[in-house]
Image (cartoon, helix red, strand yellow):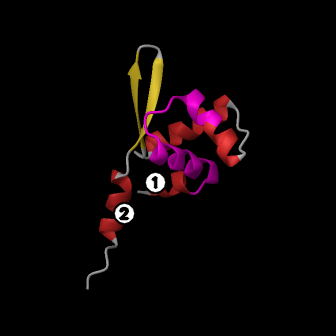
Amino acid sequence: MGDVFKALADPTRRAILDELQERNGQTLFELINRLVSKHGLSSSRQAVSQHLDVLEAAGLVRTRREGRYKFHDLDTSPLTAITDRWRIQS
């Protein structure tokens, strides 16, 4: 669970998750373009790739390859595990 909190602590990673929430199945190139145009972030390709690695290690992003392209998808199951752990009983 610590990996999830670490992944969510960074604003660029949260912006990446926002973009995947809006449109799943994006390539690295598509994500970079959306981060620049919608969020004004000018991260390098390598920096965004490293952010995606952290998100993937935390289980928040899943990847799939189709030919030479790698697509990124949001996976909210780690967030569900967190909310289930501290669910308020009425």
Q: What amino acid type should be assigned to the residue bearing mark 2? A: Ile
Kindly state the secondary structure of the residue where label 2 is placed.
helix
The residue shown at (37%, 51%) is 76
Q: In the rendered structure, does residue 19 fall within the stretch colored magenta? A: yes
Disc 2 packing (10 Å; few <14; some 14–19; many ≥20): few
Which quadrant holds the N terminus?
bottom left
Q: What amino acid type should be assigned to the residue bearing mark 1? A: Val
| Residue range of the region highlighted in magenta in the rendering | 9-33
Is 38 left, or right, of 85 in this rendering? right
Where is residue 24 drawn, in percent x and y? 43, 39
Query: Residue pushed farthest left?
Result: 90
* Residue sitting nearer the eye, 25 or 51: 25
The residue shown at (64%, 41%) is 35
Kindly state the secondary structure of the residue where label 1 is placed.
helix
* Residue sitting nearer the eye, 56 or 1: 56
Q: Residue 84's quadrant in the figure?
A: bottom left
Q: Provide the residue designation for mark 2.
A: 82
Q: In the rendered structure, does residue 14 fall within the stretch colored magenta? A: yes
Q: Residue 41's quadrant in the figure?
A: top right
Q: Looking at the magenta stretch, what is its main secondary structure?
A: helix
The span from disc 2 to disc 1 (Cα, nearest Å) is 9 Å
Q: Is residue 16 above or below residue 87?
A: above
Whichever of labels 2 and 1 marks the residue nearer the N terminus, that label is: 1
Is 39 left, or right, of 88 in this rendering? right
Marks 1 and 2: in contact by CB < 8 Å? yes
The residue shown at (48%, 46%) is 22
Where is residue 7 drawn, in percent x and y? 52, 51
Q: Provide the residue designation for mark 1.
A: 4
Which quadrant holds the C terminus?
bottom left
The residue shown at (49%, 58%) is 5
Where is residue 12 drawn, in percent x and y? 63, 48
Query: Residue pushed farthest top?
Result: 67
